[in-house]
Structure formats: structure tokens, C-alpha cells
């Protein structure tokens, strides 16, 4: 089995949506990426940090999904990263109510020995210096490095971000971030400009409007599945990235055809994530449900045209 | 050849975009629908009204596309409907600078005798009473009636709009209008509610984010082609509707598979419309260009997945 190395936060989230609110629950980009990728045949490890307030139950949960947590540092006397937010009625925008970095402030990632030759590296949204720190520890050039980031780092750490972007094969960002990073409004032009910054593949996430992948002159589009109810969007982007990186790791192949399917697999898994609070839906998800919804994705997009 | 009856404005537009501005040029929903539908093998007629300030050259242009204009009334001493608008930098929003109804204010549509048995009726965006007036003149129940409308009529003529909606098979509206008409935020729920108002098929246009068609429990999605440059969005929605109705008329079949292809055909034609001001691009468009871009639509959306 191929190896996927995941870097990303493992955290507590407290979420308010029009449908209800939660106390501190399991969250974090690394968590969502790991749970999503665990739907594929692969070996995975998370590099992250938590405090000793982080429940053993959550650690066991990650282990039970065959995620190696030897690179998940537990800081004695430290407190786990905490994020709290409130979604608006449209579920597309949110207010951050609290961000407590806690142990994340001094995070120094250590890649486990047996993952320094990982086939795929998924750099979840974190300070670009942490992302670079992980790449520097790899003893063998990975087949594929995927980077997720956000506007916060463009505002606060652009030079460091550009440094790590130079070194990755795939970048996943949302449409507004692609525009900010490139200075181009058209996503086609934005992707072209981002290509020149390093990544051969540019994935632009448009939330409920789907996702695009650009590579040279090729473009592929995966819609988001139209859903009657979106309960909690938290983690959807990370679940998408985890499905994308997880599928590619399983296949061990980085052709554009594999990338296309990976985008669909990511969108498919993300469509479940939003159905319940936090990680709840991802934890109850069965292979049968995943496959049935993949059929819906096919029905949603596949057509026949005879050219006359 | 099957018959398509089109009702919609034939008008003058004056357009400002970040890329330039035009004087009064040929526009109107009926015009864009007619030009788009003319890319298919069918007989079409436009029911509309203009003033005697409308140039013979424009009338000849419609006739040269095999569009029957015997139902296009020319009012002696009247002035043609005029719309003027300015698009913002994002090209998604616009300000209306002028709307002069002129001869449209007293428009009483007359369906030509030989189109009273049309196979497909495309009711372009107009006062719902005009749309109803056209349906009342049909001597034979059409295979399919498609209605396009907008928020303006929901605000100003809702009872009349609901009356005509009851009588149509397909409604095409944009996402915000679907939400307004249904009172539901989720497009899945909005489509369900609109089904209960009459239309068996609900087409929701999302502009640069593509279009969805809902029918019972089936959904199909056509992306918009990602474009480097959008020059002028005027008429894109009508061109989409014209391609949709035109393809169905040509095929003479209203299966859901035909509707899927029709949505793609409409999206494909609309992707050309926005490349130049007004009708300019639609007038220079060749069959070869249409076919080449259909191939791009296939490449953009088609994928293979093995379910494990």
C-alpha cells in the first residue's frame, strides 16, 4: 500500500449554524483530511500537535481508522488549538468567534521515520513555514505534493507562502483566494498565473458550485452534489482535499485521468461531510453509501452528444 | 422539420462593460432565442413587436436565419423597446440605465396561423399576460412549453405569473429567482416546490456556475465553460434558453436524456454569446466552432469511475 503523509491541525471546534450549536467537538484540517483519506486503501500518518486536554477517545478514533499518529505530538500542560465560528443563514459565509492557537503557536512538525518516503504529501492549511518544514524532512522526493492554503496566509505570510507554493505539484484554494493570489478575476487566467508560481495542477474550490482542476490547457470540472440540506460546512474543503489526495495515493498514479476521478471522489466525500456537525457523518459513512453517491455524481454529469 | 414558436422582445440595447460601450444595437430576448435556435434543424417564428424605427437590415438578418417574422408586428410611428445597462467589473451584476417600453407597452401578440400547431413553444421573458395570450392561441397542445421569466414579474405580477407557470412544462429561472419564487434557499427544495406549481421540469441557471435541470428525483448539471474573457453577458440566458428549446424541437423528443443534451447545447451556445457585444458572436458562429466546443464540454465533465 502506498503512503500518504498528512500535515494539518487536529483541533477542537465549536460550531453554530441555523440548525443548532455544538460544544467543543473534534475538528481540524488534519482530522478531516485523515478521515476522508481513510476511505481508500493506503497507509496514512498525521503530523500535528495537540495539548494534553485532547481526549484519548479522539486519538483512539484516529488510530481505529488506521491513521498513524506517531507524528501527532501531545504537549504536556498544553492546550489544543480551538476554533469557534457561526454560520450565516446562507451557510456560505461565517463569522469566526474565537481562534485560540495554543500549542499550535510553537508547533515544530516532526515527520515519522517511516513516512519520510511517503508517496503523496498533503499539506493541509497551516503556516507556510510549517508546510515547508515538513517538505524539508522528506528523504525521497514524493510522487505528488498537494498544498491547501487560505487568504489568511496571503495577507500575513505571503513571501513564505510563495516559497512553499514553488515546491508543490498541486495547490487547492477557493475561487476568491485564487483571485487574490493571482490578481486575476477570470479563473482561467488566475490558474494560468498560479501555474507560473510552481504548481502544475491548480484546483479551485467553489463550494456549492463545485471544483475545477487546471493543468496546462486541460480543465476538468466536478459539480457539488445539489443537497436538500446543508447542516454544517465545517471541514468540507479538507474532506475534499483528503479524498483527492487519498484516491491518488491509492492509485499510485498521477495522470490527469486519475486527477479527474480524484476530484470527483473528493467532491463525493465532501457531500457527506456537510450533512451533520463536525466529523459525525464521516464517522458513520459506509462504503455502500459512498458508492451509491458516486453513481449519483455520474447521473448528474454524464451525457451523450452526437456531433453532426 | 418540427416547429418552434418563440415569443420575446426584439429590441435595441445599449451596453457598457469594463471593455467598452455600444450605441443602440440589436438585442432582445426573442432575438437571442431565435439566433440560438437557428443552429438546429427546425422551423421557427418570432412573435414580437417593434416600432418603425427598427432597421430593415435587422429584419433581414432574422429572415436570413430562416426565422419567420410574420408574427413580428411593426407599429407605424412607434418606437422599439430600448434597454440600456452598465456591467460592473465582475460582469455578474449590472445597473439598468434606461428601460423604454415604447411599443411593448401595448403589445398584443398574434401567433401566425401556421405556428398555432408548433411542437415547442418558447415563452421568453415578457409580461406573463402576454405569455398566456400566446398559449391561448395555440390550436393544438404543444409537445413542450418552456417559460423564461425573472424576478421583476414576481414582484409586479405574481398572480398572473403563477397562472402561466401552471400551464408550462419547463421553467427556466436563475438561482436567486428560484429562491424568491419558492421561498426556499436550497435549490433542491426550491425545485421541488416549483414542481408543485406546475412545471415538470425546473431549469435553474447559475450564470458562470452552470445550470441544473430537476425532474422528479432526477437532477442533471451542465457547467458553464470556464472562459478567459467574458466580454458582454447580455443575452446569455436567452441564448441558453434558445439552444435548449431549439435542440428539443429538432429532436422532437422530450425524454430526460434529450433534456440533458439540450442543457449542454444551450450552455455551449451561451458560452459563445458572451465573447462579443450583443449578437455579434452569434452571427459569426460556425457549425465547426459549435462542435469543437461541444468536445470541450465533454472533456470538462466526463470521467470514468470503477466502483469497488
Image (tube, coloured by chain):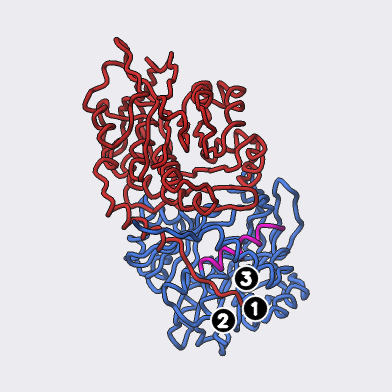
Chain colours: A blue, B red
Quadrant that contains the N terminus of chain B: top left
- Residue drawn at x 54%, y 69% as measured from the top left: A124
Along the line of sight, the residue nearer the viewer: A58 or B82: B82
- Residue at numbered disc 1: A73
Residue appearing at x 46%, y 88% in the figure:
A139
Tag 1's secondary structure? strand
The magenta span reads A263-276
Where is mark 3, residue-wise?
A: A36
Circle 2 or circle 3, nearest the eye = 3
Q: Callout 1: residue from which chain?
A: A
**Residue B56, relative to residue B293: is it above or below?**
above
- The residue carrying mark 2 is A110
Tell me the residue at 44%/20% (across/down): B109
Q: Earlier in the sequence, mark 2 or mark 1?
A: 1
Q: Is residue A274 magenta?
A: yes
Does the magenta run of residues contain B53?
A: no
Q: Earlier in the sequence, mark 2 or mark 3?
A: 3
- C-alpha span from label 2 to label 1: 8 Å
The answer to whether residue A153 shows anywhere in this view is no
**In this picture, is B172 found above or below B214?**
above
Q: For this rendering, which residue is in front, B149 or A3?
A: B149
Residue A89: x %, y % from top left? 65, 43
Q: Quadrant of residue B42?
A: top left
Could one spot residue A252 in this view of the protein? yes
State the image coordinates of residue A214 (x, y, percent, origin top left). Answer: 39, 64
Amino acid at each position: 500500500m502506498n503512503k500518504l503523509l498528512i500535515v494539518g491541525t487536529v483541533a477542537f471546534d465549536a460550531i453554530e449554524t441555523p440548525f443548532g450549536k455544538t460544544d467543543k467537538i473534534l475538528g481540524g484540517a488534519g482530522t478531516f483530511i485523515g478521515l476522508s483519506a481513510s476511505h481508500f486503501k493506503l497507509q496514512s500518518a498525521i503530523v500535528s500537535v495537540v495539548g494534553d486536554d485532547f481526549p484519548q477517545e479522539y486519538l483512539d478514533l484516529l488510530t481505529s481508522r488506521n491513521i498513524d499518529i506517531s507524528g501527532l505530538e501531545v504537549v504536556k500542560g498544553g492546550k489544543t488549538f480551538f476554533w469557534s465560528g457561526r454560520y450565516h443563514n446562507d451557510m456560505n459565509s461565517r463569522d469566526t468567534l474565537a481562534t485560540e492557537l495554543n500549542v499550535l503557536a510553537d508547533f515544530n512538525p516532526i515527520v515519522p521515520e517511516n513516512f519520510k518516503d511517503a508517496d503523496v504529501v498533503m499539506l493541509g492549511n497551516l503556516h507556510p513555514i510549517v508546510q515547508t518544514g515538513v517538505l524539508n524532512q522528506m528523504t525521497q522526493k514524493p510522487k505528488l505534493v498537494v498544498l491547501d492554503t487560505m487568504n489568511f496566509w496571503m495577507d500575513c505570510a505571503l513571501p513564505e507562502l510563495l516559497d512553499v507554493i514553488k515546491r508543490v505539484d498541486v495547490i487547492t484554494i477557493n475561487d476568491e483566494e485564487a483571485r487574490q493570489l493571482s490578481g486575476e478575476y477570470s479563473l482561467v487566467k488566475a490558474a494560468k498565473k498560479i501555474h507560473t508560481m510552481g504548481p502544475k495542477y491548480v484546483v479551485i474550490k467553489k463550494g456549492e458550485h463545485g471544483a475545477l482542476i487546471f493543468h496546462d490547457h486541460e480543465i476538468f470540472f466536478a459539480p457539488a452534489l445539489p443537497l436538500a440540506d446543508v447542516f454544517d460546512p465545517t471541514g468540507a474543503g479538507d474532506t475534499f482535499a483528503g479524498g483527492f489526495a487519498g484516491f491518488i495515493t491509492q492509485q499510485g498514479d498521477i495522470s490527469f485521468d486519475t486527477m479527474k476521478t480524484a476530484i470527483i471522489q473528493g467532491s463525493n466525500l465532501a457531500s457527506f461531510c456537510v450533512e451533520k456537525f463536525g466529523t459525525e457523518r464521516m464517522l458513520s459513512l459506509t462504503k455502500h453509501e459512498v458508492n451509491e453517491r458516486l453513481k449519483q455524481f455520474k447521473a448528474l454529469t454524464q451525457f451523450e452528444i452526437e456531433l453532426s
